[in-house]
């Protein structure tokens, strides 16, 4: 992808007004009617966080129900603080709810795309958790249907509303770093045996389940890669076949990106990082949560002097707050969706290639 194409790609995926304050979101949303929302599935790792965020903003959302077909899972979660008091419904009942506007799709990974397709067919916007299943052709069909119906698909990549990443995307879009020629990022943690067994069913292992968050950000910064080479390794071959130590190299005409992801690193969250190096400057985000950003500049730009600075950014009020308030405003027509299906398809293809999984 050429530099000019990369800039156009970046501009098309991030709205010009990249940093909308949460207070502005709430103020603007006080006028329009509350958005009736539901959730299908509680098994995804982020499911509880999404429901808690819906309920955190009663000014924006009216939660009409949650679907969980597994009776044992339903019994386990229904009296937790996150789900207590929320009606449990059958899927058909939820999708026929009067004035339902949006559904958070939070099933386990094999059911994400079939569930998303049914929601789009029912004419509702969706928040689709990551990654977008294992079938790129099926995801293409869902995106095409959503575009035809003018429905929003918001992917659940958790750094899109992170203040440090928003600063990074804005800096790249404005050219503060010059031409970005290198990205290096890491996202790891250590998981137990139960999670290892769940992840082992996917060839991409840690890269597929965890590294996808960083791939979303890499594609935002550099665009769709020309070539992806995965390096998938297992640290415990005597125990299981989980690819728990993964590296992917993304190639561009004038840039490379390396993405590492492991689920075997002790206290891996402390070392999570995203580094973007350009011909005029560098941004380092480490750790990613709670975010700390260092900016190094070759020359002054828009209020920032040359040299190295730790940038003061607003603290997170909640990992998913920005995503959900933006979803509300997009559904209400107050904002354009920040990311479109072109970006999301490029990300999903890149995730599958980085995971050594088929794209056809």
Image (cartoon, grey):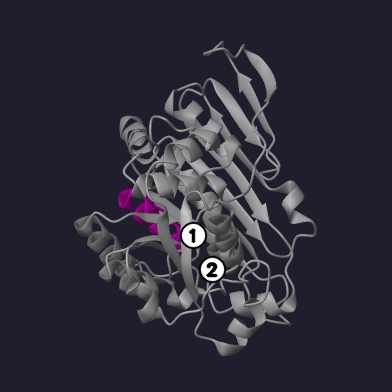
Dividing the picture into quadrants, the one containing residue 10 is top left
Report x, y in % for residue 282: 59, 27
Report x, y in % for residue 135: 37, 71
Tell me if residue 178 is in the magenta stretch.
no
- Image side of residue 156 versus residue 93, left or right: right
Question: Considering only order in the chain, which callout, 1 or 2, is on the residue closer to the N terminus?
Answer: 2
Question: Residue visible at 36% across and 66% down?
Answer: 359
Q: Which residue is mark 1?
A: 354
What whole-number distance in Å separates the C-alpha atoms at marks 2 and 1?
7 Å
Other residues around mark 1 within 10 Å, as few (<14) / some (14–19) / many (≥20): many
Q: Which residue is mark 2?
A: 204
Seen as rendered, the residue at the extreme right is 266
The magenta stretch is 340-353
Nearest to the observer: residue 330 or residue 24: 24
Q: Main secondary structure of the magenta part?
A: helix
Q: CB atoms at circles 2 and 1 under 8 Å apart?
A: yes
Nearest to the observer: residue 311 or residue 125: 125
- Image side of residue 153 versus residue 320, left or right: left
């Amino acid at each position: 992808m050429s530099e000019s194409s990369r800039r156009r790609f970046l501009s098309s995926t991030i709205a010009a007004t990249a940093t909308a304050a949460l207070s502005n979101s709430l103020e603007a949303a006080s006028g329009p009617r509350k958005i009736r929302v539901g959730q299908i599935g509680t098994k995804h790792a982020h499911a509880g966080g999404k429901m808690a965020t819906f309920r955190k903003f009663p000014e924006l959302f009216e939660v009409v129900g949650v679907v969980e077909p597994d009776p044992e899972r339903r019994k386990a979660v229904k009296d937790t603080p996150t789900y207590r008091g929320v009606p449990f419904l059958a899927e058909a009942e939820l999708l026929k709810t009067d004035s339902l506007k949006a559904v958070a799709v939070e099933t386990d990974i094999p059911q994400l795309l079939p569930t998303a397709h049914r929601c789009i067919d029912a004419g509702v916007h969706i928040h689709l958790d990551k990654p977008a299943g294992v079938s790129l052709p099926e995801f293409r069909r869902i995106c095409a249907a959503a575009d035809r119906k003018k429905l929003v698909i918001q992917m659940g990549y958790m750094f899109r509303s992170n203040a440090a990443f928003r600063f990074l995307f804005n800096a790249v879009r404005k050219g503060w770093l010059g031409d970005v020629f290198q990205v290096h990022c890491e996202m790891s943690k250590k998981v137990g045996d139960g999670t290892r067994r769940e992840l082992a069913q996917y060839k991409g292992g840690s890269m597929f389940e965890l590294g996808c968050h960083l791939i979303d950000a890499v594609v935002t910064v550099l665009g769709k890669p020309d070539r992806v080479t995965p390096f998938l390794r297992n640290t415990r071959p005597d125990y299981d076949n989980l690819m728990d130590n993964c590296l992917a190299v993304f190639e561009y005409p004038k840039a490379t990106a390396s993405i590492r992801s492991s689920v075997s690193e002790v206290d891996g969250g402390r070392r999570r990082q995203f580094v973007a190096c350009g011909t005029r400057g560098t941004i380092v985000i480490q750790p990613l949560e709670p975010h700390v950003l260092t900016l190094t500049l070759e020359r002054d730009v828009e209020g920032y002097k040359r040299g190295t600075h730790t940038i003061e950014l607003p603290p997170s009020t909640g990992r998913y707050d920005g995503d959900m308030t933006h979803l509300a405003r997009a559904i209400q027509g107050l904002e354009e969706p920040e990311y479109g299906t072109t970006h999301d398809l490029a990300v999903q293809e890149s995730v599958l290639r980085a995971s050594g999984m088929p794209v056809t």
